Image (tube, rainbow, N blue to C red):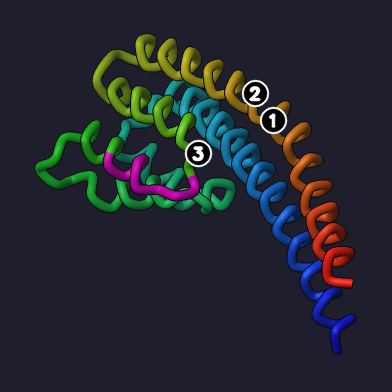
Amino acid sequence: MRWLGILCLFLTCTGIGMHAARQLRTRLAHTQKLSALLGDFSTYIRYQCTPLEELLYQFAEHPNYADFSFLRQVSREFCTEIPPRELWRDAVTADTAVPEQAAEILCTVGNVLGTTDMEGQLAALELHRRRMDALADELKTISDKKGELYRRLGVLLGAMLAVMLI
């Protein structure tokens, strides 16, 4: 029975390390998806001249961006008296799938969408997509380094506690 408890403790510590590493990978994946979203926004604005309301509706239903609730929320509440930039900011900050640093970038995007001409929107989207790509590169480096560290620390902590209990 004692060995079973030690094994459970070891596996719990290992699982915690694995979970922490997975959270880093998830944050990276979400940032990469947000960068792709900004690129898709640019494409639709450039080639289809899609109005903001229709653009939001299309991407709220897009399966690639189903992880993000802010698109559905802004699309659903778009016709209210609240200005779109405030809806966007509130929805982005409330969405738990959006990493904190990416939320700052997205909030500034919301200030531009639908407020300038097509060329202004495209330039702003390209600038913010580059910032999002840079953030994704930074998160990839962090995920690679810290992810391995978290996994190893989980295993080592579990082994240390197991040895102490033996």
Please tell me whether the stretch drawn in magenta is mainly helix, strand or loop: helix
Please state, as top left, top right, bottom left or bottom right, where the C terminus lies in the image.
bottom right
Q: Residue furthest bottom?
A: 1
Query: Mark 2 highlights which residue?
Result: 138
Please say if the residues under marks 2 and 1 sit with CB atoms less than 8 Å apart: yes
Highlighted range, magenta: 90-97
Q: Is residue 13 above or below residue 98?
A: below
Secondary structure, mark 3, is: loop
Quadrant of residue 51 in the image? top left
Tell me what residue is drawn at x 89 percent, y 64 percent. Answer: 163
Q: Residue at x 24, y 31 (%)?
A: 85
Dot 2, how many residues are within 10 Å of its Cα: few (below 14), some (14-19), or many (20+)?
Answer: few
Q: Which residue is mark 1?
A: 142
User: Which-is-in-front pick, marks 2 and 1?
Assistant: 1
For the residue marked with disc 2, what is the amino acid?
Answer: Glu
Residue 21 x, y percent position in the rendering: 71, 47
The one of 68 and 136 positioned closer to us in this rendering: 136
* Label number found at residue 99: 3
Residue 35 part of the magenta segment: no
In front of the other: 18 or 139: 18
Question: Tag 3 or tag 2, which sits nearer the N-term?
Answer: 3
The amino acid marked with disc number 3 is Pro
Percent of width and height locating residue 52: 32, 33
Asked if residue 42 lies left or right of residue 26, the reply is left
Marks 2/3: CA–CA distance:
13 Å
In the image: residue 94, left or right of residue 16 = left
How crowded pointer 3 is (Cα within 10 Å; few <14, some 14-19, many 20+) is rated as some
Q: Which secondary structure, mark 1?
A: helix
State the image coordinates of residue 89 (x, y, percent, origin top left). 29, 36
Dot 3 or dot 1, earlier in sequence: 3
